[in-house]
Amino acid sequence: MTSEFITQLADLIDRWDTLSKAAAERIDTADQAVQGDFYAGLLFGIDIARDELIAALAQAMTETAKTSTGMMKSAGQLPN
């Protein structure tokens, strides 16, 4: 996994945080209940997607680190 890809995913997570905050503000300022309900649903979806992306990114980074360590040991760059 390249550092550029990790940066892009981190930027996406930040973007989702921004959208989540905006949706939360709109819930509080909605003129009609249906508008508040819409933004509550949007917020729910954004938060789930963000949390799942964070978990997948953490798992991918862990697997990448294990693979890199294994390759370095195989190449004799790290002690066994």
Image: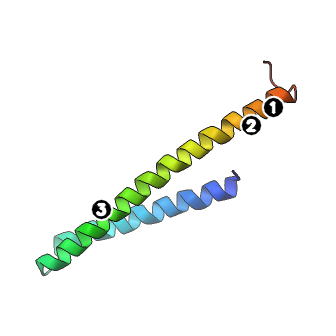
Q: Residues within 10 Å of mark 3 (few under 14, many from 20)?
A: some
The front one of 1 and 4 is 1
Q: Which mark is residue 68?
A: 2
The front one of 49 and 36 is 49
Q: Mark 3 or mark 1: which comes first in sequence?
A: 3
Q: Amino acid at mark 1?
A: Met
Residue topped by disc 3: 44
Spatial separation of the CA atoms under disc 3 and disc 1: 42 Å
Q: Amino acid at mark 2?
A: Ser
Residue topped by disc 1: 72
Q: Are marks 2 and 1 in contact (CB under 8 Å)?
A: yes
Spatial separation of the CA atoms under disc 2 and disc 3: 36 Å
Spatial separation of the CA atoms under disc 2 and disc 1: 6 Å
Q: Mark 2 or mark 3: which comes first in sequence?
A: 3
Residue at image position (48%, 59%) is 13
The secondary element bearing badge 2 is classed as helix
Residue at image position (54%, 44%) is 58
The secondary element bearing badge 3 is classed as helix
Residue at image position (54%, 56%) is 10
Q: Position of residue 64 (x, y in %)?
A: 67, 41
